[in-house]
């Protein structure tokens, strides 16, 4: 009786005799496994970026913005005002903080040093809504907003650019030629995920001061660019969005059937939409990769059928000296599965490399999970068994006498 060890040795020896053909046979598996791993890694990396963006922007906040394409019949046509923000804070339940704001990009000057940054005019609630904390000094106060004082809270990047070797607190910097006293510095938040925005490159000043000194919208007293609203929880956002929409339609005197002159957007909802798009793309790529694996399996089956034909006389001799049909079937299955597993192992390495290469274009680091690697490897083994069974069964069913006569 032939032992399993002898069968395995015979199978490996047959593969080694045809090294080039064996390697070429595994190429389909290598490409398929590598593509599966790379697709899942890039998709997981993109989702991780989106998760971090949601976390940094605040999952429980919504933004009320001007809808530029709508026609309104109200006195406040197409504009948002500080009164709108006050009405939201007073009348919408589930709201934790409201921050109306205006923004502009200007040169900020201290001594002989200048730096182009974004200056926001808002209230003391801005830090809470945006998730900033104070590292030095203080935040804006209600008194600053009420009196329109010329004070500023700066981000770490602005502090490093304008005050590299001194404490910025109490120093006077000029914004659009208007002097402002630095009263606070925000704690560092770092780059936004993906590195697109430096969250520390900003200056915050009182809203009333920005409206009168920096923006100066003529004939639009109290006008703001956005109103950011922080809810008490993620679950409250749907209710808050509905209530704000109803309140704003009443305030802007928008008649039934007419389009809103504003829009209420949840940052997390917008990023969730991006996540869904990313997931669909990843699944599409993974489907293509699975098809590649199947094509690789068909290649293995074809090569194994050719091998059976070429080795018909060898099979007959083995049967003549005592090999059973089951021994022949196991041998060819071992050859098929070995090719698949070798291709799977090489494919894992290729997939990791491809994941990092693709990530250089998406600016999102790949995330490799043990489950995706194991799944791809096991699938490659299943391909070996599934597509190798028919050639193995065909070899085991050969008639020994006919096989010995085969030329």
Image (cartoon, rainbow, N blue to C red):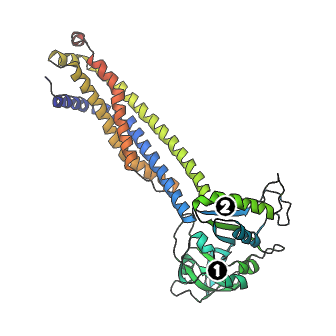
Q: Does residue 30 sit above or below 253 in this rendering?
A: above
Q: Is residue 107 visible?
A: yes
Please tell me which residue lies in front, 348 or 2: 2
- Residue at x 30% of width, y 20% of height: 393
Name the element at disc 1: strand
The image position of residue 3, as x and y in percent, is 15, 27
Mark 2 or 1, nearer chain start:
1
The image position of residue 253, as x and y in percent, is 83, 62
Q: Quadrant of the N terminus?
A: top left
The image position of residue 194, as x and y in percent, is 52, 61
Q: CA distance from mark 2 to mark 1?
A: 37 Å
Please tell me which residue lies in front, 256 or 276: 256
Q: Which residue is mark 2?
A: 240
The image position of residue 156, as x and y in percent, is 54, 77
How crowded pointer 2 is (Cα within 10 Å; few <14, some 14-19, many 20+) is rated as many
Q: Quadrant of the C terminus?
A: top left
- Residue at x 82% of width, y 66% of height: 76
Hey, which quadrant is residue 178 in on the image? bottom right
Say left or right for 395 vs 72: left
Hey, which quadrant is residue 344 in on the image? top left
Q: Nearer the viewer, mark 2 or mark 1?
A: 2
Q: Which residue is mark 1?
A: 108
């Amino acid at each position: 009786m032939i032992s399993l060890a002898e069968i395995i040795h015979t199978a490996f020896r047959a593969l080694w005799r045809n090294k080039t053909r064996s390697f070429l046979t595994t190429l389909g598996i290598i490409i398929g496994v590598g593509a599966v791993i790379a697709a899942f890694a890039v998709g997981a990396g993109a989702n991780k970026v989106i998760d971090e963006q949601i976390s940094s922007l605040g999952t429980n906040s919504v933004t009320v913005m001007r809808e530029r394409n709508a026609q309104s019949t109200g006195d406040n046509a197409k504009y948002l005002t500080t009164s709108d923000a006050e009405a939201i804070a007073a009348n919408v339940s589930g709201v934790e903080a409201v921050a109306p704001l205006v923004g502009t990009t200007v040169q900020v000057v201290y001594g002989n040093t200048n730096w182009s940054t974004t200056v926001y005019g808002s209230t003391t609630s801005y830090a809470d809504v945006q998730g900033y904390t104070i590292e030095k000094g203080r935040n804006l106060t209600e008194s600053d907003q009420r009196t329109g004082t010329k004070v500023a809270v700066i981000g770490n990047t602005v502090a490093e650019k304008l005050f590299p070797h001194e404490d910025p607190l109490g120093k006077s910097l000029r914004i659009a030629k208007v002097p402002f006293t630095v009263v606070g510095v925000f704690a560092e938040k770092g780059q936004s995920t993906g590195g697109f925005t430096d969250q520390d490159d900003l200056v915050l000043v009182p809203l009333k001061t920005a409206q009168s000194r920096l923006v100066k919208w003529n004939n639009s007293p109290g006008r703001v660019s956005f109103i950011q609203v922080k809810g008490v929880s993620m679950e409250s956002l749907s209710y808050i969005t509905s209530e704000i929409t109803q309140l704003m339609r009443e305030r802007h005197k928008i008649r039934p059937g007419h389009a809103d002159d504003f829009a209420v957007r949840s940052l997390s909802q917008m990023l969730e939409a991006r996540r869904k798009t990313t997931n669909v793309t990843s699944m599409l790529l993974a489907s293509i990769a699975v098809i590649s694996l199947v094509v690789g399996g068909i290649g293995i089956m074809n090569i194994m059928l050719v091998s059976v034909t070429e080795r018909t006389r060898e099979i007959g001799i083995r049967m003549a000296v005592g090999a059973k049909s089951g021994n022949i079937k196991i041998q060819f299955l071992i050859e098929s599965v070995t090719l698949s597993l070798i291709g799977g192992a090489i494919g894992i390495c290729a997939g990791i490399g491809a994941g990092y290469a693709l990530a250089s274009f998406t600016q999102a680091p790949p995330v490799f999970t043990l489950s995706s690697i194991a799944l791809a490897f096991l699938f490659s083994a299943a391909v070996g068994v599934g597509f190798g069974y028919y050639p193995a069964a065909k070899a085991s069913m050969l008639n020994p006498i006919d096989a010995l006569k085969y030329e």
